[in-house]
Amino acid sequence: MKIKKLIYSTILGLALLTLVKCKSEKTETLPAPQRPNIIFIMSDDHAYQAISAYGGELAEIAPTPNIDKLADQGMRFNRCMVTNSICGPSRATILTGKYSHLNGFIDNTIGSKFDFSQQTFTKVLQTVGYQTAIIGKLHLGETPTGFDYFDILPDQGDYYNPTFINQDGRYKLEGYATEIITDKTIEWLKGRKDSEQPFMVMMQHKAPHRAWEPGPNELGMYEDVTFPEPESLFDDYSGNRDAAELNNMTISKTMYIDRDLKMSDEPRRGLNEQQLSLWDSVYKPVLDEFKKTNPTGEDLVRFKYQRYMKDYLSCVSAVDKSVGKVLDYLKENGLEKNTIVVYTSDQGFYLGEHGWFDKRWMYKESLRTPLLIRWPGVVEAKTVNNDLVSNLDFGETFLDIAGAEIPAEMQGKSMLPILKGEKPNDWRKAHYYHYYEHPSEHNVMRHYGITTDKYKLIHFYYDIDHWELFDLEKDPDEMQNVYNDPDYAEIQEQLHKQLEELRAEYKDNDSLNQQFIEEYNEKVKENPLIEYWKLAPDEMQRLYREYMQKQGEK
């Protein structure tokens, strides 16, 4: 009897050992269920003011119900800031987790080249078993690495009938870019090589970038709407804001009536016959009325603002539908619970505030970018976060989520504790910013500075030496510079100290700035377009259009 029990115990022990071994081997070889998929959706120039989850005057008039779902089911970040508010540099920072002066891509105008040999978060994800893809606008070159699959727009890309570049070369498709990029992303999800492996796909839209061309399904959707004007639409840049006064990015002077607002008898380029017919059915009546009324002065500015908003928000609507389509796919295919969905933009954007469009400035509308994250089972629904987070943090966060080792050279912070509802004790108290692209199209001076919970300190330099300090509690719209105001003397001193500490921490300094300036001046000699930015707005626009026309003829 004892022998039988011994044999039985031995067999049972061996069986249990085998089960444990198999379970261990399975955990090592199939870790995907423990690691979430990541869908990173980024639009281009999408202002947080144009997302109804953030509230504001546009929320009821131009809602974004699908993007709002991410806030309803996840976390809305109220203070996500960028390190350099311009397309390419922002994307470079996201990929590398490094500031522009270290990743080498400081601006767009002089044709900065992104060095894809450097470390990126997608390369690290590949080493821990993630399938990676990028689809849509990259704006960092045409041969990206760190992706198992790429299908990208060249440079800025076209809204209608765009050209794409993938591993096999260039090709052209008929259709609307936002819809094509969405369909391509879903096709990749359906056909990915290994359905057991986790994935990271970056779906990056061209919209709503200038010149704001609505898609065939959105043309004319806001023709009967009158949008509320921002209080600062006719800002005179008083209040000791010398740098702002030098700008060349106003709706009144810099926004083209023909190219931007489509008030032209010339056929819209790049559209096929059917698309052009639909286009003309919307814009021809508007053009006829414009010629008839011939607005001038402030009436013309108001007309331009309304046209801008109708087109811009129509483009946003297509992006919102894209998000909805991706969310539906995840739900219908059992991927919803184990997939993180992130929505953001490469930076913020002006919707008439200070009379502006575009971005670049360290002022709030362009510094602050939307960020919404849904992670079922981890991020509590309807959570609102007010920490100072940054696009510098995205890469580290994704790597931390994946359980990958974060490269020491990355300069951001993982937001994983925040997503889990924890409050990190060592979270940043100030955010550092540095913008380089000057001389350039909009005459925004080079500047750097810091933003804290209550204050913002900015230094404009290069061909100007001007400091600005804003009390963000008393002056949230940043209309009054209080630098050198005796009442803020102590605060000003503290901010200067904080600024220098951050510059040292991020390895930025005046010597490096001077090096970039010298390199820039050399490249100006090679690029005639840069010289145009130094001219008066009207002359610059004329020469720019002539240059672009010649390029088109080539």
Image (cartoon, rainbow, N blue to C red):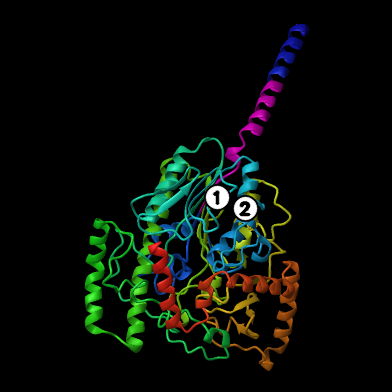
User: Closest to the observer: 550 or 480?
Assistant: 550
Residue in the picture at 41% in, 79% down: 251
Disc 2 crowd rating (10 Å Cα; few below 14, some 14-19, many 20+) is some
Q: Where is residue 439 in the image (x, y as percent from the top left)?
A: 56, 77
Q: Are marks 1 and 2 in contact (CB under 8 Å)?
A: yes
Which is nearer the N-term, disc 1 or disc 2? 2
Say whether residue 46 is left or right of residue 60. Answer: right
**Residue numbers of the magenta segment:** 16-40
Residue for badge 1 = 143
Can you see residue 203? yes
Residue of label 2? 116
Task: Tell me the element at label 1.
Answer: loop
Q: Quadrant of residue 36?
A: top right
Q: What x and y, as percent, mark residue 242?
A: 57, 88
Tell me if I can see residue 211 in this picture.
no
**Residue 541 covered by magenta stretch:** no
Q: In this view, does 553 lie above or below 265?
A: above
